Image (cartoon, coloured by chain):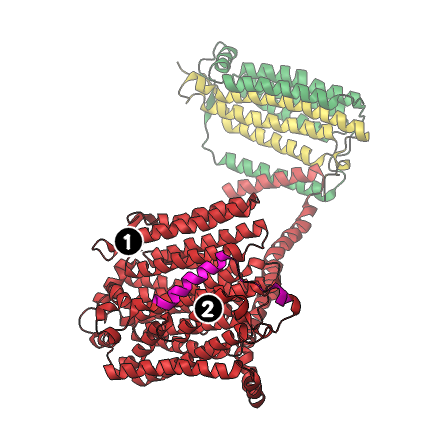
Chain colours: A green, B yellow, C red
């Protein structure tokens, strides 16, 4: 059962991933990406990472992509350029390089010894509690730093997007 | 306490991650619209997240402690946080750019050159 | 004072510091006088105190070590002062004559501005400090400190009137000529370290003396190298050229530095290292030959000079030649004896000349002088005493010392020293001829300056006056010393008692006996010099009559009603010879053509070709050009397009994956 769920989610992610970068309508791009994120959340859930699945949906699909939508509507972008338009050499080299990196990674993965995975131990009752405890104990410093980063990003975004007044 | 085994080879997840990464990279390198590039960038970030998830999944059973087994997931948590910050700043930048040139085609922003 | 010798040089150094400060504050001259002359006076008292203390105790060589100055590997050099008979003799006359000349300077420099006056005394005090370090230093490196210090002061004081280009150039000339010599001196010090492992006089000299044969070759090399330094400092052929031009400095400077003290440093050094020269006979022979040639060569130039100070300058070179001749034939005590008497009478001659110049409003040309005898009697009589002394008239100081040197040279010939007896006979002949010329040109000077009628303008004549007491007092003291100073070295011949020759007896410990074997015959030739009493008396008479002959010739040439007639006829008959001598054998011109111009062209080549083109052009600007060129090409990578940059990053990632595979 879980295998089928995973394969279906993977197929969905790849198809809508391609759509997200290839379609000329930015709205469709964003919405395709929402589908991709939903698929990834499903995979997380299958792997027993319930907390990640939740924040994937809440933060990414719920917040970040909505922000994208807002900006697209704000700037009133109806359609974007075709994929690979403009600089020819940049497009060819870019595609080749990307595929080459992917190929190299695939080859690298193939050399790994095959292994089955497992749900993280101690997470039968959900991972929210152990992750929360870990964030408040072992990873307290990075956690606090991230809060600082978010504040900085907030202020930075405000400064950048603000209308320049003389 | 026996960890619950799930019959999915961890390599599959990695393959999926690689494919998504390539799609994202192509998007970043081939698109000219700033927002589109950003979307592709989000896709790449998510593929990296997936790779982390794959390794967290793969080594969960072999981890010394329960807290250790969660490190991969916590990494993903931080990446999501950083990605959120990055999206906020990046989109603000595009708004500022648009204000100046009425476009967010990055090929039009090339004054920082020889 | 013995036990803290460092106080002696320190006092003038304090005076130097005070005068710098006073000059900076533009203090009154009286304060400068107290600081400048007072410090040297105190140093003189301290020096004599130390000398008395030294004489009262039995040890003949005392070394006072203060601290380690240089410590590098096996080499250590202590800051240490040494007092022994040689130091005593040198220190005694350096401080005393130095003090007298400082007193004299009060009057002579009175016309200068306050700052120049302070500057003058600051330099003079620094000179006294350096000279005392030179004399007291117990090792070659420490001696070199003083050696360089006096050279620096010499340069500063020659160029005292540096607004005048000639004075500034003369200072540079002296400095550069000394540098050339110092190269040899420094190499000599290095060689001493390399061969003996130490350059302390109390260490390496006994080693050399104990193994004369083993170190003969090295001693010759070291001796020659050190002597190169001496030719620079003591103005010998071929580096003497700076001394005549050094007369551009104020006259007290010429008296103190370029006659009495600094220029004798070379002689002092040779005598100090006499062991080295004795076991390396070739070096000793070179010293003798250079000294003898310089003596006659410089004397012959002095004959045709018309500048009163130039005559005295060439006379100094000539007398220094005598000293080296004495040292070269192994008569080290005689050489130092001549250093001392020469300090007396030559300082007096210069101070007298300064008095004359002072009276003649700065004019130095003897052709426009004359008849000064009546106006300035003190100067005249003291000058005459010094002239008689330098001419070698009994019983004036120069007679004893010069005769001692000439006698020993003849004895060296008679005893066939080093197997070069004939050469020493020739050197003796050169010396005796130089003595004749010396008497001639010195009395030429006296007659032209003090006798006859004044040949200057009426205005100058009106200005003529005797100098103030601060100037005449040193003249009188030095005059007395020029008359009686020779009696510290009466030859055995006259008294029959060797011990009555005080200076030679006193200096005996300085001449360290050589080890057995080897130089028994050299030692014999050096210390035993009896050529028979009869011959010695004959030699005495010969030199005396030669000197008198010189005086008489000068009198017939330059005195009386027909003065200047014979010289004029002489010039008419031998115009080429006269021109040659008048122009100092064109040595300056030859040096200019042979050494200076090629060197100048070489320097110009280094500047234009090597520095400008290779260093500046290729290396410095070339680096900049290459950087700029690279940047000019590479900057096109900066397209300003972020997508290109992103592609570069991606390619870099790919590259890293491939490399790290």
Residue interval drawn in magenta: C460-485
Circles 2 and 1: CB distance less than 8 Å? no
Question: Looking at the image, can residue A40 be seen?
Answer: yes
Circle 1 SS class: helix
Mark earlier in primary sequence (2, 1): 1
| Distance in Å between CA atoms under marks 2 and 1 | 33 Å
Residue drawn at point x = 51 percent, y = 47 percent: C32
Number of numbered discs visible in the structure rendering: 2
Image: C578 above or below C101: below
Question: Callout 1: few (<14), some (14-19), or many (20+) C-alpha neighbours within 10 Å?
Answer: some
Question: Looking at the image, can residue C418 be seen?
Answer: no
Q: Position of residue C312 (x, y in %)?
A: 49, 71
Q: Where is residue C188 in the image (x, y as percent from the top left)?
A: 36, 65
Q: Position of residue C428 (x, y in %)?
A: 35, 81
- Lateral position of residue C249 relative to residue C97, left or right: right
Residue closest to the far top: A125
Residue drawn at point x = 55 percent, y = 88 percent: C574
Q: Which of A108/C261 is in front? A: C261
Residue on which disc 1 sits: C52
Residue drawn at point x = 38 percent, y = 80 percent: C431
Nearer the observer, disc 2 or disc 1? 2
Circle 2 SS class: helix
- Lateral position of residue A78 relative to residue C79, left or right: right
Residue on which disc 2 sits: C381
């Amino acid at each position: 059962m879980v295998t089928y769920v995973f394969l279906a989610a993977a197929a969905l992610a790849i198809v809508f991933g391609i759509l997200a970068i290839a379609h000329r309508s930015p709205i469709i791009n964003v919405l395709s990406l929402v589908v991709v994120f939903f698929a990834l959340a499903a995979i997380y859930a299958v792997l027993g990472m319930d907390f990640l699945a939740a924040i994937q949906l809440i933060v990414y699909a719920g917040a970040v992509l909505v922000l994208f939508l807002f900006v697209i509507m704000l700037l009133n972008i109806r359609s974007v350029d075709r994929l690979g338009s403009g600089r020819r050499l940049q497009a060819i080299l870019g595609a080749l390089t990307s595929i080459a990196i992917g190929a190299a990674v695939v080859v690298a993965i193939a050399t790994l010894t095959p292994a089955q995975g497992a749900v993280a131990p101690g997470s039968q009752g959900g991972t929210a509690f152990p992750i929360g405890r870990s964030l408040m104990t072992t990873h307290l410093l990075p956690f606090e730093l991230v809060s600082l980063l978010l504040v900085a990003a907030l202020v930075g975004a405000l400064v950048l997007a603000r209308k320049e007044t003389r | 306490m026996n960890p619950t085994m799930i019959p999915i080879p961890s390599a599959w997840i990695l393959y999926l991650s690689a494919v998504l990464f390539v799609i994202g990279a192509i998007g970043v390198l081939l698109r000219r619209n700033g927002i589109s590039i950003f979307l592709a960038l989000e896709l790449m970030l998510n593929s990296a997240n997936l790779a982390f998830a794959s390794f967290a999944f793969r080594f969960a059973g072999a981890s010394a402690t329960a807290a250790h087994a969660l490190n991969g997931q916590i990494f993903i948590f931080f990446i999501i946080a950083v990605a959120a910050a990055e999206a906020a700043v990046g989109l603000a930048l595009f708004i500022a750019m648009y204000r100046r040139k009425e476009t967010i085609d990055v090929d039009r922003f090339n004054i920082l050159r020889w | 004072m013995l036990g803290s010798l460092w106080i002696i040089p320190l006092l003038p150094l304090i005076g130097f510091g005070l005068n710098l400060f006073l000059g900076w504050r533009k203090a009154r001259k009286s304060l400068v006088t107290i600081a400048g002359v007072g410090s040297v006076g105190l140093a003189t008292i301290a020096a004599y105190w130390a000398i008395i203390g030294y004489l009262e105790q039995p040890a003949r060589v005392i070394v006072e070590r203060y601290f380690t100055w240089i410590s590098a590997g096996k080499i250590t050099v202590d800051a240490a002062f040494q007092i022994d008979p040689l130091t005593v003799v040198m220190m005694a006359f350096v401080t005393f004559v130095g003090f007298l000349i400082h007193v004299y300077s009060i009057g002579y420099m009175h016309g200068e501005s306050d700052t120049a006056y302070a500057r003058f005394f600051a330099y003079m005090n620094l000179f006294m400090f350096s000279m005392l370090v030179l004399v007291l230093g117990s090792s070659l490196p420490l001696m070199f400190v003083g050696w360089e210090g006096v050279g620096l002061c010499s340069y500063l004081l020659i160029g005292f009137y540096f607004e005048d280009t000639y004075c500034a150039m003369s200072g540079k000339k002296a400095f550069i000529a000394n540098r050339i010599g110092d190269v040899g001196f420094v190499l000599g010090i290095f060689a001493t370290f390399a061969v003996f492992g130490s350059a302390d006089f109390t260490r390496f000299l006994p080693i050399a003396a104990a193994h004369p044969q083993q170190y003969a070759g090295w001693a010759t090399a070291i001796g020659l190298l050190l002597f190169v330094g001496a030719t620079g400092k003591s103005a010998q052929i071929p580096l003497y050229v700076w001394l005549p031009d050094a007369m551009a400095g104020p006259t007290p400077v010429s008296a103190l530095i370029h006659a009495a003290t600094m220029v004798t440093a070379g002689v002092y050094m040779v005598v100090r290292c006499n062991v080295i020269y004795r076991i390396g006979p070739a070096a000793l022979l070179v010293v003798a030959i250079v000294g003898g040639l310089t003596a006659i060569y410089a004397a012959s130039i002095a004959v045709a000079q018309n500048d009163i100070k130039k005559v005295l300058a060439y006379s100094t070179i000539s007398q220094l030649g005598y000293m080296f001749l004495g040292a070269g034939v192994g008569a080290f005590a005689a050489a130092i004896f001549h250093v001392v008497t020469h300090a007396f009478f030559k300082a007096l001659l210069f101070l007298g000349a300064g008095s004359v110049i002072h009276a003649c409003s700065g004019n130095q040309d003897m052709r426009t002088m004359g008849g000064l005898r009546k106006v300035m009697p003190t100067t005249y009589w003291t000058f005459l005493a010094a002239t008689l002394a330098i001419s070698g008239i009994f019983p004036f100081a120069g007679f004893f010392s010069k005769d001692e040197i000439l006698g020993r040279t003849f004895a060296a010939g008679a005893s066939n020293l080093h197997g070069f007896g004939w050469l020493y006979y020739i050197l003796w002949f050169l010396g005796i001829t130089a003595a004749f010329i010396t008497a001639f040109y010195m009395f030429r000077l006296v007659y032209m300056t003090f006798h006859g009628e004044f040949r200057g303008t009426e205005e100058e004549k009106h200005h003529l006056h005797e100098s103030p007491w601060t100037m005449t007092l040193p003249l009188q003291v030095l005059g007395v010393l020029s008359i009686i100073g020779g009696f510290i070295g009466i030859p055995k011949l006259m008294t029959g008692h060797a011990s009555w020759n005080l200076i030679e007896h006193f200096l005996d410990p300085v001449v360290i006996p050589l080890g057995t074997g080897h130089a028994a015959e050299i030692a014999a030739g050096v210390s035993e010099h009896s050529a028979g009493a009869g011959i010695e008396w004959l030699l005495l008479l010969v030199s005396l009559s030669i000197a008198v002959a010189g005086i008489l010739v000068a009198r017939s040439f330059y005195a009386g009603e027909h003065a200047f007639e014979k010289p004029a006829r002489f010039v008419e008959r031998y115009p080429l010879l006269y021109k040659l001598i008048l122009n100092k054998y064109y040595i300056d011109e030859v040096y200019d053509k042979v050494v200076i111009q090629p060197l100048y062209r070489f320097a110009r080549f280094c500047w234009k070709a090597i520095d400008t083109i290779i260093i500046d052009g290729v290396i410095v600007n070339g680096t900049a050009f290459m950087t700029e060129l690279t940047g000019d090409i590479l900057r096109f990578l900066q397209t300003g397009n972020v997508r290109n940059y992103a592609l570069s990053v991606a390619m870099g990632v790919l590259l890293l994956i491939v490399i790290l595979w």
